[in-house]
Image: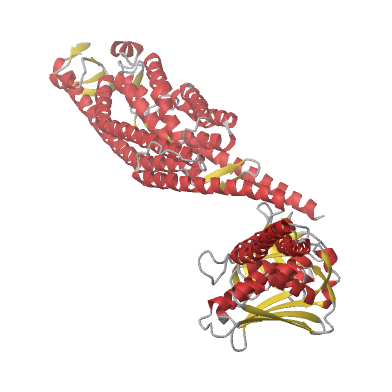
Amino acid sequence: MIATTFNGSARLGRLLRIALFGLAGGLALLLCTERLVLAPGVELFAGPIFYLLVYRMLGVRAGVAAAVVFMLPTYVWWGHVFSITMAIAHVLVLDVMSRRGWSLSAATVLFHATVGLLANPLFMAAHYGAPPTIMGLTVIRKLLIDLSAAVLIDVLFLRYRFDRRALAFRRRPGLSLGRAIECATLVLLLPAIILVFCSDANDFSRRFDGYRAELVQASAQVARQQGDDRVRQVAVDLKRLGVQSILVGAPGTLTDDATRIALGCDRINDGRHPGGANDRNTFAYWLRACEIGGAKGAGQPIAFAVGTRSIALHAYGELFDAMMPLIGLLVLALVLHAWINRNVQRSLRQWRETVQAFGTPDLPMPALPLFSELQRPVIQFVRENNRFAQVAAERERLALAFAELKETVDLSLLSDVTWNPEQRALGYFAVDLWNEPHWRTLAVHPNDALSLSLSEDATDLVAEFRRAGSDEWHLLIARDRLAPDRWRWGARLRLKQPKLMAAGLAHQARLMELGGMASAISHELRQPLFTISLAAENAEILLDNGATDAVRAKIERITTQVARASAIIARITNYARVEHDAPEWLDLPELVRAAASFLRPLLIQHNVELRLHADANAGLVRLPKVGVEQIIVNAVQNAVDSIAARSDLSEPGAISVSVVDCGSTLQVMIADNGAGIADEIASEAFEPFKTTKGVGAGTGLGLYVSRQIMREIGGDITLTPGPTVGAVLTLTLPHDALASNARLVA
């Protein structure tokens, strides 16, 4: 029902608009039947305004029909269809040029400079026998009328367009710069030219009436002086007006055809106002009219007849001469406008071509527009475009790199990264280059929760973690900390071989630690090798003396020392090899003793005593042997280095290793009486490549790798200053997590 009502209202509105346009067309036609006569042959009429308006509103077919209808009164005025034909040609030329982007004003000037300038003189010469001055005035008058109409329509359609479906004018969203300049130029110039033209036409009318009065007066004087001869030679006054002869006769005898033939006229101007075509308001009338007058000669009335063609040509010549400066000004204005419009269009084309090249890398500087107002934007645009193109190319490279990373390691860009330690949940907005960011939450494996916690003064986070219920490892990088457990942006990627990378890093750390113990190991091996060498020499001497029992004892001693050296080499090889570190049942105190045995050369070298204290109920635990052994070795080695670096060497060095069962956790504490460590350094000791040792004495990887191993098995590691001297390294292993490590770290 609503739709029906709406359609009915729209239809009614359209019918009303059609009726209004029909009424407006009727009023326009009525207006076109009138003309403003400024002087004989100088008229203004409204026909071009309306047929040009119809053409712009409804198109070329309606424009041609409107040209016929609205120019039809000219047939009544002048008795020919030439003006109607020219109006039709005008519409057709406008349609051709409008398709090329020309305005009505410019196309109208082109029409009159070509078709009008050729057709009008030919028609005037053939139909009226008009002289060049009359032809020129006719061309000027028609140009001014048509150009004024075209400018009015251009101004209207500069701001509005006509909706043919709705039969309504719609406001344009913007103005054309070239059309606006054209309209402004002509709107300022044309009214002034038309006003001057109207003024000159009024002066022409007064001068022409004066010439007619002078002609009648001079002709009467000639008639009185010459008697009653039929044809008289004119006096000097008439010659000045271009009159060669007059007819003189009795009153009432000079209105016949003979008079008209003799004087070359076909109309008698006897004071009456005949209607129809070519009436007194046209130049054709006065070119072919004869003035009839009377005078008294020799006591009796005398009539005379004289042609007005000569004074009409004289008056029209003066009007044409007066109009020439205006025409020159109009031509100059049109040339200037054409030059400005050409350069405006060229500048706009250059600007458009420059803008269309947006995004082109290394865009060259184009030919600059003529107008300085457009030169600066073009220069600035080219500079900014080249900067943008560089950024766009870099963005494209980054996008391709991101796509490759995303395909390879499932890279995700993150914003507003948050960590909830209570729920062990990582939340963030996943940034998609092609879609809107969306919120995601990941549950983190309990053993990896500690890796996502930062100290209060840290601003960035780099951590490896596993999703809950999954063995896949992920790397999280979070930057620009906004609040505790919240960062502005970050990235997450899937690690395809995290264990291999971690194992490689740990292996490198172990090799570096072996390098640090090289001198101590060398001393440890030198003793059994020296003993072997000495026993071999003694055995050789005893063999020469035949003491076989003594030789046997020496050989046994050699065997013992070889076994001792083999054990040292085995410990080094086991510690340095790369192996799959699967969890196994370990006796922690026994593991500490093995590590102490491995480090015996280093302890002896620095005269350090290592003591072990273990609770009786510290039973077996399931842990990766190599990883835990590496932590203990690194801790003891750091303790030895700290003892060696202390300033007070009077007290013997001592390291205490305690294995304590704390109920829910199992702790291994390694304390020393070395140089100690400051609180601020202790908080940074687990960062990669952080070391307090001299150049070449430390890598800064030992504690970092130890923390990674402890986090992987769900434990914790801390470093604190000792109660009085030295430092304490504490390893915390949760009892309830140890059983699950067999699956998680495999």
Q: Quadrant of the N terminus?
A: bottom right
Q: Residue at x 62, y 76 (%)?
A: 639
Q: Residue at x 50, y 65 (%)?
A: 695
Please tell me whether residue 398 is drawn above or below residue 569 in the rendered image.
Answer: above
Residue 329 appearing in the image: yes
Q: Residue 698 versus residue 250: which sits nearer the camera?
A: 698
- The residue furthest bottom is 724
Q: Position of residue 646 (x, y in %)?
A: 53, 80
- The residue furthest front is 545
Q: Position of residue 143 (x, y in %)?
A: 39, 30
Q: Quadrant of the C terminus?
A: bottom right
Indicate left or right for 737 with 607 as reference. right
Q: Position of residue 249 (x, y in %)?
A: 25, 15
Residue 33 appearing in the image: no
Q: Position of residue 369 (x, y in %)?
A: 37, 39
In the figure, residue 228 lies in which quadrant? Answer: top left
Q: Residue 649 versus residue 296: which sits nearer the camera?
A: 649
Indicate left or right for 351 with 40 as reference. right
Q: Residue 681 versus residue 29: which sits nearer the camera?
A: 681
Q: How many marks can you see?
A: 0
**Colour setup of the view:** secondary structure
Q: Residue 629 versus residue 388: which sits nearer the camera?
A: 629
In the figure, residue 113 lies in which quadrant? Answer: top left
Q: Residue at x 75, y 71 (%)?
A: 594
In the figure, residue 134 lies in which quadrant? Answer: top left
